[in-house]
Image (cartoon, rainbow, N blue to C red):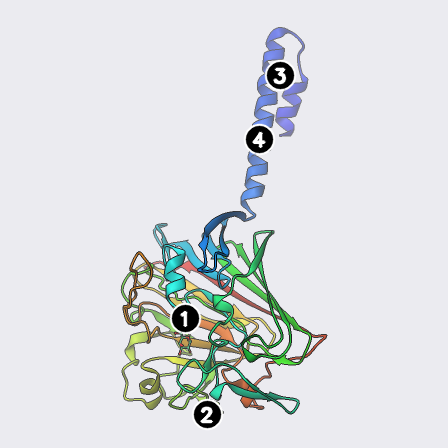
Amino acid sequence: MRYLAAKCASGSNPAGRRDREKMTMSLAKVILLTMTTAMAAHGTVTKATFGNTSDGTAVDIYTLKTEGIEAQVMTYGARVVSIKTPDRDGKVANVVLGYSALDGYLDDGKTYFGAIVGRYGNRIALGKFSIDGHQYQVPVNNNANSLHGGTVGFDKQVWKAHEVADGVEMTLVSKDGDQGYPGTLTAHVRYTVHHGALRIDYSVSTDKATVVNLTNHSYFNLAGDGKGTILDNEMMIPADKFTPVDAGLIPTGVLAPVEGTPFDFRKATVIGKRINDDNEQLKIAGGYDHNWVLRGQNGEMKTAARVYEPGSGRVLTVTTTEPGVQFYSGNFLDGTKYGKAQEGFVKNAALCLETQHFPDSPNHPSFPTTELKPGETRHSTTTFTFTTHAK
Ligand code: GLA
């Protein structure tokens, strides 16, 4: 640049002027290139319409893009709709399950594809809990228990959204008594993209003591959306303990060692290797659908899981400030076809890594608390980072 500027300054004859003009042009190009490069280091965010819910509410979709990742997030359920990342040869594919149009999501009330689930991610036994001596009853929508916030959880509500640097922030105000939960809860969920990573920052506050456990329910298939099952994926979860469940998938309250069980993923292990073992916990859930107790402090950023898909070479690393992760091997996916496009997914077509507080914490005083009091703001962060591994 300094060289170009010096050349521009020299000469006043016509040839010199032409030279000067050329140099000015080159200088402008260099400046433009520098600006574009600087801009490329930041994510771009674009907004479009995705459709309307049955009551006519408009749903928007945001596309967040930066090096190594393009993620789409919509306002219905603050859901991740797609995440595109390159494989080891640079071939880009969508690595989360989803539908091509909104009606697929509206039609499918069971899978929670890509959603922010809440107010209480995962189960509350019999839908009952008490806070400061008050008993609360929330909807029972999963056998005898309450799952993912009730009949009309956060996954089925249209969130407000506004663009932020490198992403979008979604906001939902859930009124006092919404699905039986106490307190008006304000939830902010911020999605941002950073060099091959999708980051989710949660922050929640309330005006009355309540319980809250938000998570993201994306279904990952690192080979690409709709490409076989995740049974040949290798996974590592750095956890020494997990929370075994009863027949209704409610934690018994015991923190059981993973040592010597099919729940030991401390060393990367092929998911399908032990999934059909003669193990009571696997039989109850029809595969993996359990919470692992992560090492390290609640509130501290730590690794929750790493998954490697050998065919594409894609690696997903999940880090979180949450104390647990629910590894769900897509056991209830049964090929049911949803929406006008009649899209469906088979058992084990993807896996979920739901970073969270433990299921049914309101009924287990020994688990890290999910209570939130007025005046407090709870923050939580989870990142999904995509890299590749050579053959
Ligand atoms: C969570 C639960 C599963 C199942 C899925 C959604 O992962 O633990 O049992 O309900 O959500 O289908």
Work out whether mark 3 precedes mark 4 in sequence or the reverse, and give the earlier one: 3
Q: CA distance from mark 3 to mark 4?
A: 15 Å
Whether residue 210 appears in this view of the structure is yes
Tell me the CA gap for discs 1 and 3: 60 Å
Q: CA distance from mark 3 to mark 2?
A: 79 Å
- N-terminal of the pair, mark 1 or mark 3, is 3
**Ligand 1 shown in quarter:** bottom left
Which is nearer the N-term, disc 2 or disc 1? 2
Q: Nearer the viewer, mark 3 or mark 2?
A: 2
Q: Tell which circle, 3 or 2, labels the residue nearer the N-terminal end.
A: 3
Labels 1 & 4 near each other (Cβ < 8 A): no
Tell which residue pokes out farthest to the top in this image: 13
Which structural element holds mark 2?
Answer: loop
Q: Residue furthest front?
A: 55
Q: CA distance from mark 2 to mark 1?
A: 22 Å
Mark 2 = which residue? 252
Nearer-N-terminus badge (4/2) = 4
Residue 367 in the image: x percent, y percent? Answer: 56, 87
Measure the alpha-carbon separation of dots 1 and 4.
45 Å
The image quarter containing residue 261 is bottom left
Q: What residue sits right under mark 4 in the picture?
A: 30
Q: Circle 3 is placed at which residue position?
A: 20
Label 1 lies in ligand 1 vicinity (Cβ under 8 Å): yes
The residue furthest right is 375
Mark 2, ligand 1, within 8 Å: the answer is no
Q: Which mark is residue 40?
A: none
Q: Which amino acid type is marked by label 1?
A: Cys
Q: Is residue 287 left or right of residue 167?
A: left
Front disc: 1 or 4: 1
Which residue is under mark 1?
A: 352
